[in-house]
Structures are given as structure tokens and as C-alpha cells.
Amino acid sequence: MAKETFGVAADEKIVREVDELVDECDDLGAVGSEIVEAILTAFVQSESNHVERVRKIIIRKRKGTL
């Protein structure tokens, strides 16, 4: 499967959490982009309604309630 690069600007809190995951996965030699890809993979492969969940998250972030 081919990979495609795209830019993402993340909140500082998210960046800190990803950095913590990188530290926790030190034994695997995982880097931040690999962690983010794993998170996206888990989300997309889940059984939930992705559109509904993403819309709710966007609305909550815009309202400052997330």
C-alpha cells in the first residue's frame, strides 16, 4: 500500500500526548508520525460511525468543550 504525506497542525496538548506515547514505545523505536498513523488506523478500522464522531469532535473543539 502506498503512503501519502499530509501536513497536520495539532494542539500542544495533543503533541505532548504523542511525545509521551513515543517515549512509552521507545523499545519499538517508534516515531511520532508512526504513532499518529497507528491512532488513525485504529480509529478508521473501528466499528463506529466515523462521520458522526468526527463531526461531534469538531463541534466540541470549536465550542471549547473538548
Image: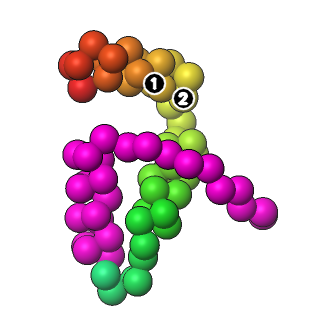
Which residue shows up at 54% across the image and 36% down it?
47
59 versus 53 height, above or below: above
Query: Does the image show residue 38?
Result: no
Task: Provide the secondary structure element on which disc 2 rests.
Answer: helix
Quarter occupied by residue 4: bottom right
Residue 64 in the image: state x and y as whole percent.
23, 19
Q: How far apart are marks 1 and 2 (CA)?
A: 5 Å
The residue where tag 2 is placed is 50
Which residue shows up at 78% across the image and 64% down it?
1
Q: In which quarter of the image is the C terminus?
A: top left
58 versus 32 height, above or below: above
Q: Is residue 10 magenta?
A: yes
Which residue shows up at 62% across the image and 50% down it?
6
The residue where tag 1 is placed is 53
Magenta range is 1-25
Contact (Cβ within 8 Å) of mark 1 with mark 2: yes
